[in-house]
Structures are given as C-alpha cells and as structure tokens.
Image (cartoon, rainbow, N blue to C red):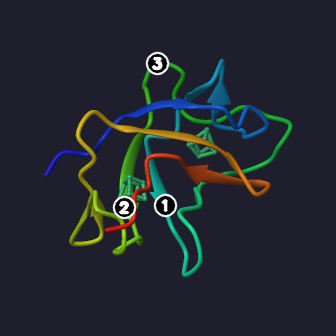
Amino acid sequence: MEMPIIKSCDVTECAYNRQNQCHALAITVGDSRAPMCDTFWRMDVKGGDPAKVGHVGACHMNQCMHNKDLECQANGGITVGHKAGEPDCMTFKAR
Ligand code: SF4
Ligand code: SF4
C-alpha cells in the first residue's frame, strides 16, 4: 500500500498548514462520528517538514469507499477542509 497525498488543506489555522498545504508527514483521519483530521493542532508555531507534502498515514473510516483495511487508498489523494466547524476529509464518500 502507498500513503495517499493530501492535495490541499483549507484549514490554515492548523500548525501543519502553510499556504493551504499540509506538511505533517502522516496524518490520521477519523473518529466514531466523522472523517475528522485527528492530527489538526492549533498552535502559534508552524510544524511539519516544509519540504514535504503530507500524506494519510491511517484512517479509521471503514464506512468510506476509499478505505481498505483502515488505510486510505483514495486514488489521487485527498483534500481537507472545514465541515461543521471541524477539519474534515472532503474526499470521504460513504460506501
Ligand atoms: S490535513 Fe490536518 S494536519 Fe494537515 S494541515 Fe490540514 S488540518 Fe492540519
Ligand atoms: S478518503 Fe475516505 S479513507 Fe481516505 S482519508 Fe478520507 S475518509 Fe479516510
């Protein structure tokens, strides 16, 4: 399996976000309710590796059609944005 890329992220208030790009090496997505980015972190410093683009390390959303064995296998990567006030995977699609 390959880790899908995070093509863009509109959650600019996250410490890992620079110019709408995620720079966390591997995020985790999903809790029991929603495909939320669990790596989201609000802080006054910037983190991650600015030379690298983030990838999805793991995803708990078994009910997403892109999920295989609790890993994201979205072809072409995912986008992240705001949904109901939370940083959510916008590529989520129910099976
Ligand atoms: S994908 Fe998650 S960790 Fe990365 S910048 Fe967006 S909210 Fe932050
Ligand atoms: S596309 Fe589906 S499997 Fe991939 S991170 Fe988003 S919710 Fe998880």
Q: Residue at x 60, y 53 (%)?
A: 88
Q: Is residue 2 left or right of residue 24?
A: left
Q: CA distance from mark 3 to mark 1?
A: 22 Å
Q: Amino acid at mark 1?
A: Val
Q: Is residue 45 left or right of residue 31?
A: right
Depth-wise, is mark 2 or mark 3 nearer the camera? 2
Pick out the residue farthest to the right: 44
Q: Which residue is mark 1?
A: 29
From this view, report whether residue 40 is shown above or below residue 33. Answer: above
Percent position of residue 86, x then y: 73, 56
From this view, report whether residue 29 is shown above or below residue 34. Answer: above
- So how many labels did they put on this image? 3
Q: Nearer the viewer, residue 66 or 44?
A: 66
Mark 2 crowd level (few <14, some 14–19, many ≥20, 10 Å Cα): some
Asked which secondary structure carries label 2, the reply is: strand
Q: Which of the numbered marks, if any, corresponds to residue 58?
A: 2
Percent position of residue 55, x then y: 38, 41
Determine contact: label 2, label 1, CB under 8 Å.
yes
